[in-house]
Every structure is written in structure tokens, then in C-alpha cells.
Amino acid sequence: IISNEAVTRRLALVKYMYSVAVRQSQRPEPLSLVSILTFHDAIELFLELSCRTLNIDTQGVSFMGYWERLHAKLKEIKREEVTPKASMERLNRARNEFKHHGIMPSKLEIERFRSNVASFFEENTLTIFSRDFASISLIDMIQCGDAKVSLREAENMLAKEKLSEALEKIAIAFRQV
């Protein structure tokens, strides 16, 4: 079993990878193609973290094998299953075709994958970790406690449209680190 702090930090890493993939997907073709690999990696990290959190053995598991193991455990503890399997199967196939055979998905397919991955994270972060994916922040990866507090305060100030106060808190956090 993994600590709550470690889970939070790894979820922040997953969200970062997802945001990198989103930016990659918005680039012109053929540059947008690498987003397929990054989306896939972000999901795989999420699935591995899910299994570790729920104490599920993942040795030798394939990408699509995570669903079977997670489904059994989630059924046992009376939670909803991990969704959407079919769209992730399409992403996995597209990734394998691209990486191993040079078959390039269209820009439309990449946009569909981006949308499907967003849904995957929104639904399953809540199901497995009882957290809202949108609330996960890179601030969670910062180890300096004082800087983390200052950045949270800056985040709150930005939400209130107090830009100069937020910048001051960010500068303080930078100094604290």
C-alpha cells in the first residue's frame, strides 16, 4: 500500500503528463502524433498507481490487463468499475500501430483520443481515489512545505483575481525553495 502523500504526488505527475499530451495533441501534424504515446503513458501510470493503492499485484500485466484486475478488486470492495475500456483499447491499438508499424492516426482520431483520455481521468480519479481530477495540482509535487503553502495561497489569490498579491506569494515560494 502506498501513502496518501505519495499517491497525491504521483497523481500530480499523471496530470502533468496528461497536460503535456494535450499540448502535443494541439500541435500540427505530424508533431501531434507523439501525443498518442504520452496519453498512453499517463494512463498506464494511473492504472499502475490505482493497482498499488488497492494492493493489486501487477507483475506481468499488459496495458489492457489492468482492467480485469481492477474490475475484480473494485467489485470486491463494492465500487464502480474502471471506465471506459473500449476507448482505451482503441488508444492502445493506435499506439501500438504507430510505435511498432509506423501507422499514423489522423488529427481527428487524436482529438477523439484527447477527449476520451480526459473522460477516463475525470471518471476514474473519482472512482478509485475519491478525488476530482481537476483539483489535482503540480503544487502537490513540491516537497518544501512552506513553499507549498505559499503557492496554495497564490492559487487562491488568482482565483479572486488578485494578481499582484498572487505574484508576491509566488515570489515568496520561490525564495522558500
Image: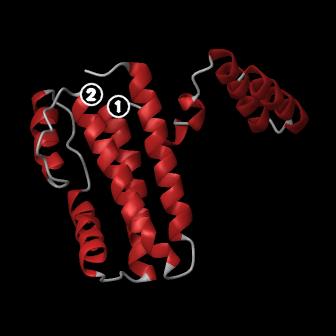
Whether label 2 touches label 1, CB < 8 Å: yes
The kind of residue tagged 2 is Thr
* Count of numbered circles in the view: 2
- State the residue in front, 151 or 96: 96
Quadrant the C terminus occupies: top right
Q: Secondary structure at mark 1?
A: helix
Which residue shows up at 20% across the image and 43% down it?
81
- Percent position of residue 25, x then y: 50, 69
Quadrant the N terminus occupies: top left
Measure the alpha-carbon separation of dots 2 and 1.
9 Å
Looking at the image, residue 125 sits to the left or right of residue 68; the answer is right
Given this view, does label 2 or label 1 mark the residue nearer the observer?
A: 2
Q: Which mark is residue 53?
A: 2
Which residue shows up at 69% across the image and 22% down it?
147
Q: Secondary structure at mark 2?
A: helix
Q: Label 1 belongs to which residue?
A: 129
Q: Earlier in the sequence, mark 2 or mark 1?
A: 2
Which residue shows up at 30% across the image and 83% down it?
103
Looking at the image, residue 66 sits to the left or right of residue 164; the answer is left
Answer above or below: position of 71 versus 6: below
Answer above or below: position of 172 versus 136: above
